Image (cartoon, rainbow, N blue to C red):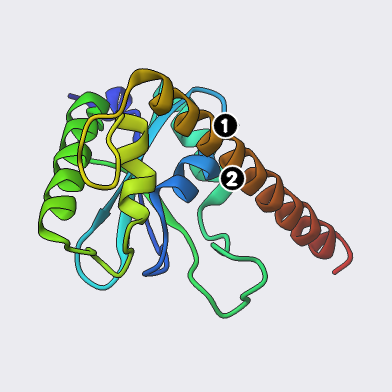
Amino acid sequence: MGDADIRTLYISGLPPDARERELRNLFRFDKGFEGARLVFKGASPIGFALFSSSDAAASAMDLLNGELYDPADQEGARFSIKFAKTNLDLAKASKASAKMQMQQTQTGSTGQGQGNDHYNMYGSQMGYNREGAQQPDQLASINYALEQIANANMVAQNMQSMVAHMGGMANM
């Protein structure tokens, strides 16, 4: 697979408490964004974001590379973004995420200090309750809708922060 075929970004410089939902929200309005995954290896997580084309991925990379993760924390983590070695397989990543959720639910593991947030990121979307039992479709749909509302609120807050940050940069 040549570089022109790579549509996935490798994102480092994320803080240890970063969430996959935040990563998805970061890119969700970028042209061609298809999905994202967060992987916890070592002290800080790394992210992968898949786009419909390498040009769309390059555009997103140009926009965020070197920017602060949290504009309110001027000493905080900065994004370091480059093309990944291979493309993200969203179907495979979703299955791995669901499997991880089930293992954590069964063992009571909190994983990387995130407690039941893994349930919120994976379980409710997959139709599982906190005990790992399959929920009725209607309840799963309601949980998913509520999660989408929470995501929209988070995106609005992130966009307000970005606008405030960009406005501050224009006054420099």
Q: Residue at x 59, y 43 (%)?
A: 150
Q: Residue at x 62, y 48 (%)?
A: 154
Q: Which mark is residue 43?
A: none
Q: Residue at x 59, y 45 (%)?
A: 63
Secondary structure under tag 1 reads loop
Which quarter of the figure has residue 40? bottom left
The answer, for residue 9, to whether it is visible in the render is no
Q: Residue 61's x, y, as percent?
A: 49, 43
Mark 1 sits on what residue? 30
Q: Identify residue type, mark 2.
A: Leu
Q: Residue furthest right?
A: 171
Q: Residue 95's x, y, as percent?
A: 17, 31
Q: Which quadrant, please, contains the N terminus?
A: top left
Taking 110 as reference, is 51 left or right? right
Taking 1 as reference, is 38 left or right? right
Measure the alpha-carbon separation of dots 1 and 2: 10 Å
Q: Nearer the viewer, residue 14 or 4?
A: 14
Q: Residue 98's x, y, as percent?
A: 20, 37
Secondary structure under tag 2 reads helix
Camera-nearest label, 1 or 2:
1
Q: Identify residue type, mark 1.
A: Asp
| CB within 8 Å, label 1 to label 2 | yes
Mark 2 sits on what residue? 63
The answer, for residue 81, to whether it is visible in the render is yes
